[in-house]
Image (spheres, rainbow, N blue to C red):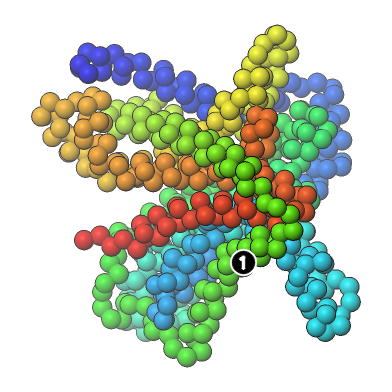
């Protein structure tokens, strides 16, 4: 491409990027714009919601978030401290085993534990037969505490990852300095390690709570009154778009506040010194555990892996093996193809957008380019329920103004609306991966390339693309897996006869057909292992 052609494209880049930002930000903007439709009926509706369902949604969501925050903090920080501050047999294995619950969608864990722990489940039946007990042996798992347990064992790796990184990179030398000053091991942990890991824990908890608030599968399956379940109930059951939009606004504001907390915590994590090598004096190495202390460390690290991955997989395998009906293998191929097709299309488009944005910022870090990048980066924090409402609201407005318009058919009867919703949510995943790859490419490499006559898109094609190959493949896989597991947006926006593995697993589990639901659920777990393996290899990679 000539320099003149590249210069022409560069001049068009900023308006195109602004248009891209508007397209990806449309759902959030539409939800906020719904408040402009203020009428006496809207006021009556708000008053009715405030006196009926809104308090239940608020208190249930608050209680759930508090329990999840406490649970992921204890499990995430406890396991991170165990594998970084202490040395025991099997520690290296636990470092990657503790990542396995990331492969389990929370709704799959919910299906497994409901079947296993309910009144008619195998565990209660076995205990009643063995000891002659009668009645329910514990409260129904389909409750707020049951949902909190599911989210805790599924989402604690967010805290584990960030806390482990903080402890590895910032604590070793300071723990050694505290030891030389005479501080005992408990005091070093209490006054050095834990305070330094506090911003990382806050960031991990914020991420876990964003996932909790965005969830639809667990809350709907358990029948608990959260904001996400309320949004779908208002839209689909009550056929009230205004109520759904206003509930979506409340959820969006809460999630954005959590995102702000996570970003602030990340900035606080940067105050510390640069990376500290794990190789140092013997005193700065992890404390060796033996005897009872080693058993306690094994128990601390084994419990979340068992609860968050091993037991759900075994329960699902048991249900699959004991299925009394013939499994729909032929239809499973259709479900898998729909999931693979949507995941592949979205992954390619999201990575393409991410590469263009990252390259544009690399070439010219203008206000427009940085703003568009930040807007796209916010997408992952927007819950799927909010994206659905935000896409369907403008469709309704267009159809009211132009009844003969076919916009609604294009959005809801084809894959266009679904891929659009996926891009709103998951472009941020691809962008973060590509930007991390660009951060490792020295800026002077671009200068050297320009001196050799490689400029414009040739710089991206000949210089950046080979260096970004690994991060681009990682971005493709991450977006692909996220799309495969996405449930809320797919439930509403999928075309007819285009069910995906996630949707079918939810529908079969909701109908108490767990044996049939186990097949698509286990397929999702298998796909979810791909990013976990990549992440484990990245964490264990030791630079030369």
Q: Nearer the viewer, residue 403 or 63?
A: 403
Give the percent coordinates (x, y) of residue 44: 86, 29
Residue at disc 1, secondary structure = helix
Name the image quarter holding residue 46.
top right
Give the percent coordinates (x, y) of residue 37: 74, 21
Judge left or right: residue 188 versus residue 524. Answer: left
Q: How many marks?
A: 1
* The residue positioned farthest toward the bottom in the image shown: 291
Q: Residue at x 86, y 80 (%)?
A: 133
**In the rendered view, would you say 89 is above or below 475?**
below
Please name the residue that numbered disc 1 is placed on.
314
Name the image quarter holding residue 120.
bottom right
Q: Residue at x 62, y 20 (%)?
A: 410
Judge left or right: residue 105 versus residue 177. Answer: right
Q: Is residue 434 visible?
A: yes
Q: Residues within 10 Å of mark 1 (few under 14, many from 20)?
A: few
Q: Quadrant of the N terminus?
A: top left
Q: Residue at x 78, y 77 (%)?
A: 126
Q: Quadrant of the C terminus?
A: bottom left
Name the image quarter holding residue 443.
top left
Give the percent coordinates (x, y) of residue 180: 32, 81
Q: Residue at x 27, y 36 (%)?
A: 465
Give the percent coordinates (x, y) of residue 186: 47, 81
Q: Nearer the viewer, residue 196 or 319?
A: 319
Q: Nearer the viewer, residue 168 or 529?
A: 529
* The residue positioned farthest toward the left in the image shown: 452
Q: Nearer the viewer, residue 446 or 493?
A: 493
* The residue positioned farthest toward the right in the image shown: 134
Q: Is residue 256 visible?
A: no
């Amino acid at each position: 491409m000539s320099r003149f052609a590249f210069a022409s494209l560069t001049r068009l880049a900023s308006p195109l990027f602004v248009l891209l930002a508007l397209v990806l930000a449309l759902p959030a903007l539409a939800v906020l714009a719904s408040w402009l439709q203020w009428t006496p009926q809207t006021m009556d509706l708000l008053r009715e919601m405030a006196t009926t369902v809104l308090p239940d949604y608020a208190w249930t969501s608050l209680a759930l978030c508090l329990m999840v925050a406490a649970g992921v903090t204890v499990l995430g920080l406890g396991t991170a401290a165990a594998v970084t501050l202490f040395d025991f047999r099997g520690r290296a294995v636990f470092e990657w085993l503790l990542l396995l619950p990331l492969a389990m969608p929370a709704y799959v864990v919910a299906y497994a534990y409901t079947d296993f722990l309910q009144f008619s489940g195998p565990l209660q039946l076995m205990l009643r037969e063995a000891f002659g007990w009668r009645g329910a042996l514990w409260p129904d798992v389909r409750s707020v505490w049951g949902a909190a347990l599911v989210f805790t064992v599924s989402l604690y790796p967010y805290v584990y990852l960030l806390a482990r990184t903080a402890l590895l990179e910032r604590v070793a030398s300071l723990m050694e300095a505290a030891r030389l000053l005479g501080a005992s091991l408990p005091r070093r942990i209490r006054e050095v390690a834990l305070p330094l890991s506090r911003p990382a824990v806050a960031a991990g908890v914020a991420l876990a709570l964003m996932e909790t608030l965005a969830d639809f599968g667990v809350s709907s399956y358990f029948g608990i009154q959260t904001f996400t379940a309320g949004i779908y109930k208002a839209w689909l059951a009550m056929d009230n778009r205004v109520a759904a939009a206003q509930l979506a606004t409340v959820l969006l504001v809460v999630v954005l506040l959590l995102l702000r907390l996570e970003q602030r915590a990340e900035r606080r994590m940067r105050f510390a010194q640069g990376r500290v090598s794990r190789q140092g004096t013997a005193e700065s190495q992890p404390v060796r555990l033996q005897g009872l202390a080693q058993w306690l460390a094994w128990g601390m690290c084994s419990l979340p892996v068992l609860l968050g991955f091993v037991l759900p997989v075994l329960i699902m395998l048991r249900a699959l093996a004991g299925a009394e009906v013939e499994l729909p293998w032929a239809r499973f191929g259709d479900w898998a193809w729909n999931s693979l097709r949507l995941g592949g299309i979205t992954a390619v488009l999201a990575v393409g957008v991410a590469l263009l944005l990252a390259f544009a910022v690399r070439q010219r870090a203008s206000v427009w380019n940085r703003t568009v990048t930040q807007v796209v980066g916010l997408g992952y924090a927007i819950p799927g329920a909010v994206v659905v409402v935000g896409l369907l609201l403008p469709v309704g407005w267009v159809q009211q103004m132009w009844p003969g318009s076919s916009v609604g058919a294009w959005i809801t009867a084809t894959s266009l609306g679904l891929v659009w919703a996926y891009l709103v949510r998951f472009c941020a995943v691809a962008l973060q991966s590509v930007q991390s790859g660009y951060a490792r490419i020295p800026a002077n490499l671009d200068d050297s390339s320009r001196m050799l006559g490689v400029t414009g898109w040739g710089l991206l094609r000949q210089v950046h693309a080979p260096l970004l190959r690994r991060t681009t493949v990682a971005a493709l896989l991450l977006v692909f897996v996220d799309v495969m597991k996405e449930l809320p947006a797919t439930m509403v926006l999928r075309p007819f006869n285009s069910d995906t593995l996630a949707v079918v697993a939810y529908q079969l589990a909701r109908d108490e057909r767990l044996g049939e639901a186990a097949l698509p659920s286990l397929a999702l777990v298998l796909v979810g292992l791909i990013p976990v393996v990549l992440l484990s290899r990245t964490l264990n990679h030791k630079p030369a």
